[in-house]
Image (spheres, grey):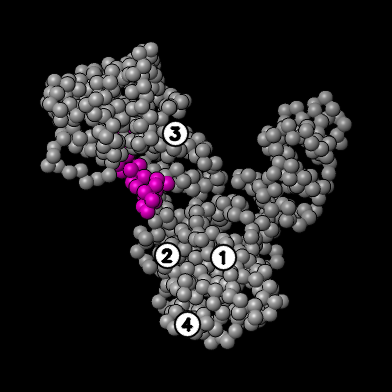
Amino acid sequence: MKANETKINQFLELNKIQFVIPVYQRNYDWSIPQCQQLLNDILEVAENGNINAHFIGSIVFIHDDLYTSNTVKELTIIDGQQRLTTLTLIYLAIYQLAQNINDNDKANEILETYLINKHLKEEKYRIKLKLTDNNASALQYLIRNDAQEEFNQYSRIIDNFIYFQSRINQDNYEVILNGLEKLIFVEISLERGKDDPQRIFESLNSTGLDLSQADLIRNYILMDLKPEEQQKIYQDYWVIIENLARDEITNVSKVSDFIRDYLTLTEQNIPTKNKVYEEFKKKYPTKNNLESILSKIKTLAKYYHKLINPHRENDPDIKRELEYIDRIEINVAYPFLMQVYCDFDNNIIDKQTFIQILLLIQSFVWRRFIVGLSTQGLNKIFMNLYEKIDTNNYLLSLQKIIIQKKGSQKFPTDEEVLEALKYKNVYNIQSKNRLYLLERLENYQNFEPVILDSKITIEHIFPQNPDEKWLKDLGKEEYNFIKNNYLHTIANLTLSGVNNQLKNKPFLEKRDLPEFGYKKSSFSLNKYLADLDKWDKNEIEKRFQWLAKRFLKIWSYPVINLREDEGEEINIFDADEPKGKKLEYAIFCDQKIEVKEIAKLYKEIFTRLFNLKPEIFFNTELGEKIMLKDEKHKHLLRQATSISNNFYIEANIDSNGKFDKIRYALSLFNLEDELIIKYAE
């Protein structure tokens, strides 16, 4: 590796050189704010006579003769492409300006010095900066500068060039050229076979945009390959994965999220969002069987694509359920659903089973939301859910697994969910959840489903600001009871496209209003109201019972029989006494622990906690409770078991005592939801 301080203009004016942006590099991502900052820096350094140089970071490239033609030397840029591309656009904007003001000498100087290799005849080598795909086409279009030609694709290259055109003019372009001459950078040249480009790439502290986990993974996969193999892997696998793992509505890449979900599914361990690349490298430390690995990832990307873009599913019944899952953002289930989708595609399950699973997931998550259970533990449930399925009895085995969850992981029963729903303030929940609830209730057994849009609003039957006649009709006691207990509940809400006409009117006026009243409404939720003569506490409670029946049909609880001896995963805080019991396994912080005895679990948990934050053992009463001793004093313990190289705890405690101490420790560490156990049957 060689590192030198170099002026950027001297680097760009090298002859018979092509700066190659490899396919594994991320796209050109700089937007107007970054371009504005760079141009402002150039103007500032140009106008300040006391500044002789301005440092803009580093450019790292692989330099050798192995992949160099006889006519041009290729430098493969592995870091610095954002700055290099942006500087090229500034020179290009000045070039076109010089043409427009008939300064042909300056235009030719810039073109032939910084933009093209003048004496090379082969078209593929003429432009000095060789970008990838769409960006390359955009740069070629700008250099041609043909007034008869249009560029019909979106590219940041075009956007940023237009910005520079708006800022660079006849009054300041010479100043900008002066500033460009003062820009310096560290030129880091690597030699293939001797230096480790990936390690150097990871360690760089770039001043540009942060690399995503997907960027790092792409570089890791492609960087060391020969150019021909690199191109093949990129075109046959990676670019397809990138296209599939993209939200088509927002045009946002979801590759990092997809790889995280893929690793969650395959490793049964949930990587933190900023550690996905590290976990990927651990799983694939070498690039043996690279195509086989990427083939599996590409296959699952096909199903992930439909999960984040439900409109891509052709079957209308499946698409509807995917849209509901997408709307209420059950993305924690994606690791599980990707594999289930794959099983459906491979005819392991039929369409009806697949739809029943999608409905089951909605019921499980939605019921938990209604009763107010935390969403934090859901990712752990879906992390290893697939491995527990009996593919010979697919749906039933899944239903059994889910309804056996207890405590913070439970599937709320009919009684629990209705008790919560009756008084729940559903009007002030997130808009997407409120509309999901009402749309599904509205469309129950409706053969012409209603899709709620911005014209349809939520209507309070008993208004938020009632007309004074409401108080007169109901009396003060009932009026206050409804306002304090039922105002924002599901029983007092309906749908309306004419909320402004109904407003705060008394109930009978709302019911009978010409053209707009409940009697004229096409919504099924309002047909119930059309025949009522009053709206009081009793009618609200009757309507709740009517809606409750719909709710339980839509978000149903599996009706299956469980043997009393069938085991279940359960949080240790919700578990029965362990005395006389064995374990099948445990899951701690998303990692499965193959452990059968309570004593071994006790040792394992305290070992991990000590490695995590040893200071808690000394700064709280925890050390005293578990009788923590160092090597010198371990003889004071009746049965010493080690939790580190130098520290021991008392193991001569019954199983119930061990569980009590584990629970106490987890509370101190704020890890109450992180230990799941399963008793052996």
Circle 2 packing at 10 Å, graded few (<14), some (14-19), many (20+), is few
Magenta stretch? 229-254
Secondary structure, mark 2, is loop
Q: Which mark is residue 427?
A: 1
Does the residue at mark 3 contact the one at mark 4 (Cβ under 8 Å)?
A: no
Q: Nearer the viewer, mark 2 or mark 4?
A: 4
N-terminal of the two: label 4 or label 1?
1
Q: Is residue 253 magenta?
A: yes
Q: Which mark is residue 270?
A: none
Q: Which residue is mark 2?
A: 454
The image quadrant of residue 562 is: bottom right
Quick check: marks 2 and 1 in contact, CB under 8 Å? Answer: no
Vertical position of residue 63 compared to residue 312: above or below? above
Amino acid type at circle 1 is Tyr
The relative height of residue 231 versus residue 310 in the rendered view (above or below) is above
Cα distance between the residues tagged 4 and 1: 24 Å
**Sequence order check, earlier mark of 2 and 1:** 1
Give the labeled residue for mark 4.
513
Q: Nearer the viewer, residue 459 or 75?
A: 459
The secondary structure type at the circle numbered 3 is loop
Mark 4, other Cα within 10 Å: few <14 / some 14–19 / many ≥20: some
The picture places residue 483, in percent across and down from the top left corner, at 65, 71
State the residue at coordinates (44%, 25%): 204
- On screen, residue 622 versus residue 94, left or right, reads right
Residue of label 3: 210
Label 1: element kind: loop
| The C terminus sits in image quarter | bottom right
Mark with earlier residue (3, 2): 3
Spatial distance from mark 3 to mark 2, Cα to Cα?
37 Å
